[in-house]
Amino acid sequence: MSTTKRTFANFSFFDKETIEKKLEQMAAQGWMLRKAGSLFWTYEKTEPQKLRFAIIYFPGVSALDPHPSQRQLDKEAFCIQDGWQLVLRWDAMAIFCTEREDAVPIDTDPVPHVETLYQTMKKKLLTGQLVTVALILWALYLQLSQLWRDPTDYLSSMSSLFAIPFWLLLLCSGVVQVLVCFRWQRKAKKAAEQGVFLPMRSNKLFTWGVLFLAVLFLLLSTVGSNANLVVSLCFYGLMAVSAVLAYRLVGWLKKKSVHRLINLLITTALTMLLVLVGTFGLVRAVGDGWFPVESGRQPVDTYEWNGERFDVYDDPLPLEVEDLMDVEARWSKEADWQESPLLARGEYRQNALLNEEVRKYCLSYTITDIKVSALYSFLRNRMLHGRQDEIHNGVVFVDHFEPVDPALWGAEAVYQLHWDDSILDTYLVCWDTRIVELKFYWEPTKEQIQTAAELLCP
């Protein structure tokens, strides 16, 4: 039979009453606490005992402190004199137990008890949570800015699409924890003035539920791409290894009696260095082709021009130059495709090789298939407003789309690009579920436009 047991710590660090009752139940079953941690608590097999447990907090104590402070030692000495035995110290918490039923309770005045617990929360929880909330808000701002700049690319990418709900869940968790702390402090202070201690309660089920959903969104962001999954797992593995090494380093420096500030600086610096080096190595590995990030776009050939080597692709395209005219040349045909539950977006390019004489006969176009009709107006407006005239020193630099007759295209609406003092052969063609931005590198005939419309329409 095993003499040790590990249990999941399904309670808050500040949930004093819940922890005390849990320890009393474990002692009655013959298990005594030997090690506390953020995720798991370890117990050792003993004889079943009827024990009382008490927890006290020290706001100024850090998990990085190599030795207990004099205030801790003095407080522990008083507790021992009153019949309490120190079980262990963990971070800003000290746990005591006693067999004596007549032992004087450690905290008898609820007013300083509430104040001590709140001060500990401010240092251990609130400051960190407020900083975390600020960082999450910044991450959300960056995501929303990217969404606003190029919504079709953002909403058609699985990794981007689930980023906003992921950060929103983390934000919700952080804000709720901060609000719970302030709400408890307000109520507990009033209750303490009436001589009653109001325990701090936390909803661990809510916290773990939010974390589960956040992890689920992270996993969903890798769906449909083995390369993204491998890269993501490598990155998460790097973060996990960094966290474990940081935890081990903190413990080792504590044993060496290193001051907590120096411990913090050394651990932070080395952890950041490890993360930066690991991230650089991962990016380098992706760039060197260790991961098949572009498995759908493998070159079929290479060629040289002006002393440089270029790749040649032969991806299938829905519309090719050969569909519009009779021209012979060597081409590079590239297709990039990404899809989410909201959008499907493909970018297509057909370019003559740089050493060909017919280089002007090229095509580039983007096809956006909209699966959720409510997004249609928003996406069309963002595509139109993606081109905006600019004024510099009183001079207007023209760059915008203007509507043209859609009949030739068989579409609901068509817009042509006006740039500088020219009208370019770049069109935004809108059907009911598809929007195509098409650029001709020559002036197309009506027949060529009709053929392109027939091949590109949904």
Image (cartoon, helix red, strand yellow):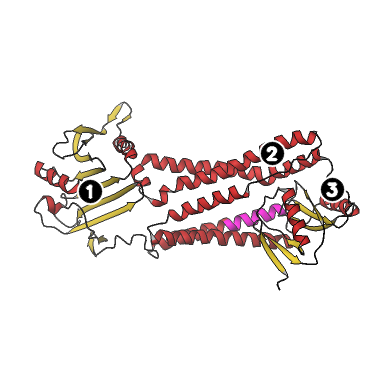
| Location of residue 432 by image quarter | top left
Q: Quadrant of residue 373?
A: top left
Task: Tell me the quarter of the image containing the N terminus.
Answer: bottom right
Q: Nearer the viewer, mark 1 or mark 3?
A: 3
Left or right placement of residue 107 versus residue 254 in this view: right
Residue at far bottom of view: 1
Q: Which residues are magenta?
A: 257-271
**Mark 2, residue position:** 184
Could you tell me if residue 65 is visible in this image?
Answer: no
For badge 3, the amino acid type reads Ile
To which residue does mark 1 refer? 364
Callout 2 touching callout 3 (CB < 8 Å): no
**Amino acid type, residue under disc 2 in the picture:** Trp
Please tell me whether residue 436 belongs to the stretch shown in magenta. no
What label does residue 106 carry, if any? 3
Relative vertical location of residue 15 with respect to residue 392 in this rendering, above or below: below
